[in-house]
Amino acid sequence: MLEIKNLHVKLEEEDKQILKGVDLTVEAGKVHAIMGPNGSGKSTLSYVLSGRDGYEVTDGSATLLGEDLLDMEVEDRAAAGLFLAFQYPVEIPGVGNMTFLRTAVNAQRKARGEEEMSSAEFLKVIRARAKDLKIDAEMLKRPVNVGFSGGEKKRNEILQMAMLEPKMCILDETDSGLDVDAMKLVADGVNALRDEGRGFLVITHYQRLLDHIKPDVVHIMANGRIIKTGGPELALEVEQNGYADILEEVA
Amino acid sequence: MALPQAKQDATEARITALSLPEGGWADPARRDALARVRAMGLPNARDEYWKFTRPDTLVAAEAPAAATMDSGEAPLFDSRDRLKLVFVDGVFSPEESDDLSLEGVTIDRLAEAKDIHWAKDLYGVLEARAQSPVARPLAALNTAFASDGLLIHVTGKPSKPISLIYRHVSDRSDAILHHVVKVDPGAEATILENGPAAARFNKCMEVDVAEGACLHHIRAQGRDHERRAATHIFARLEKESVFKSFTLTVNGAMTRNEVVVEFTGDDAVAHVAGACMGDGDFHHDDTVFVTHDAVNCESRQVFKKVLRNGATGVFQGKILVKPDAQKTDGYQISQSLLLDGDSQFLAKPELEIYADDVACSHGSTSGAIDEDGLFYLRARGVPRGTAEDLLTIAFIAEAVQEVEDESLQEDLVERVAGWLARRRD
Ligand SMILES: Nc1ncnc2c1ncn2[C@@H]1O[C@H](COP(=O)(O)OP(=O)(O)O)[C@@H](O)[C@H]1O
Ligand SMILES: [Mg+2]
């Protein structure tokens, strides 16, 4: 599904190398988790994959279903099936959440040569998905993320994911700032989308989220590299001992 | 005080090119106005009030030519039930207009109203009141020479909007129109205006909103690229009255829209808003002056400008709070979205407050499209162009939302979307 090879990334404006050779393959139907200390490059990886400005790929490659991701426009990556749940969802005053979602869903369909969703069908689907995530009609009408609490923003990300039905989902610290109930909602939302044809890359600091979204593989990232890969037990190890042991072990 | 010779000459040149309509109830008002024009002189580039906008083409004896443009879109408000009143190059066209009868309002043509009329107490009166503290000579010129216009007396609650439709036909038309609107106590109406009126257009609208009355005014200034316009609205608000005016301007080489609001009765509300879309050889100036001279009144000024490709936007807005105007609530915001580095926005927001118990705020900003917002939309699959359009429409939303009727908001936004789409073709 997602294949990252020897990915090197530096900041465009500064001479600062952030990713120093990341290798990672996420297979369809699997959930991979990335854990790692602050500043290790987790968000950078997610941004580079989704095409944000400001980064320069100096070496390596990333493909989605065999297609070169790094060569595509941001919107084309989305249409190809990539989805990033943002660590910090962006507020867009003046654009209604519903309008935003309908525009996005239909733009992707159009790009893939599929038929656009009618207003009636879209309404039906979004109401059902929103209900599962306890997002009320009022929140759907409000401008995108404006005045939303931290938890509401994260639930809104999951709603978008549910509506867009991507093939490869990257979740960047979707658990941060969530209380236990909200985390459960978010995890249920993600689990509902788990499917043989879909891959997940869940970036998190804490084991907590991984209790609810059970990963198949856990990677530890530090200083721009994946330094260790293992099963779910690796997350527990981090939870108990922190990163220090692992960092030392590899050093 | 004698005027500088150059100003005097320019003023006389303009006056000589016009002929004073004669033989009606408005004669004294016209003669007074002409005297005001001569005393003030028409504006030139040295005038402080015209620091950001060159008045020369608005003042010149002859109007610069302006071609008409057909965008292929249906005219705005076309599908709505409304009383249609059509002006072609500044001349009222009875053939193209509806019958002037509508319950709750009486409408007369300025050019035909020979008898003493209620408008006598208003025609040129609100304009003259607004000549201090700042001179507005183009408005006085209008009072003197306006050859046509409508006298609209709202006595009840007409069932549909009164819709003034301007059509620009001749490349060289130079139109001066003067409308007077009187809204009786408790009455309520909506006035729509749309279309490019002429190659050069000078328009005044004097509005008197009586106790408990309400007037909604929604205007869309036409999209002919080369047209020029200087417009004035003079609104006087009495006790517990409401006046809401919104203007959408799309294209035009030169537009100066002045709005002068005076609160004379307590507990009244005035909202003046505008959005403009400018590309290239486009200069748009909103000049607003709100005087609070009564207790507990609310005024809002909300102006948004979208500028690209070297377009210029100007905002001069003032809130004057007189000593007895306690509990005034005044708000003013002017913002520009610069779609590229060539465009510019010049703003002069002013507050002048002589009462102590007031809440007034103002702000002015200028910026580019929000890159984070753009990336977020694109990351969800919205193509760059569509995403930019969404963000641009979002930018003007605060101004458009000043229009109470949501279906009118939709019509206006559709116009803006059309403008944006044409830029990308
Ligand atoms: N746009 C940027 N400008 C400056 N520094 C950046 C930028 N993006 C990332 N960095 C730096 O790169 C490193 C990795 O950051 P990030 O990817 O956010 O890490 P993580 O998500 O693992 O906490 C940090 O040192 C951060 O300061
Ligand atoms: Mg991060």
Image (tube, grey):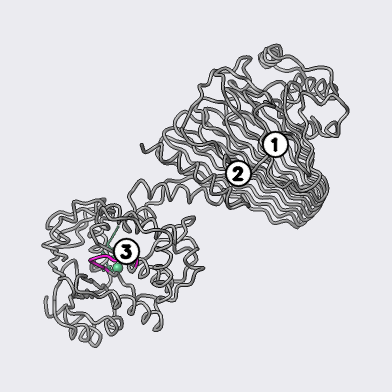
Question: Residue B80: which disc?
Answer: 2
| Residue type of the residue flagged with mark 2 | Arg
* Residue at disc 2, CB closer than 8 Å to ligand 1: no
Up/down of B198 relative to A83, above or below: above
Up/down of B198 relative to B159, above or below: above
Q: Secondary structure at mark 2?
A: loop
For mark 3, what is the residue?
Answer: A164
* Residue at disc 1, CB closer than 8 Å to ligand 1: no
Question: Residue A64: which disc?
Answer: none
Is A146 left or right of B168, judged from the image as shown?
A: left
What's the distance in space between the residues labelled 2 and 3, CA to CA? 37 Å
For mark 1, what is the residue?
Answer: B233
- Of all chains, the one bearing label 3 is A
- Identify the magenta region: A163-170
Image x and y of residue B161, in percent: 68, 43
Residue drawn where x is 59% and y is 18% of the image: B63
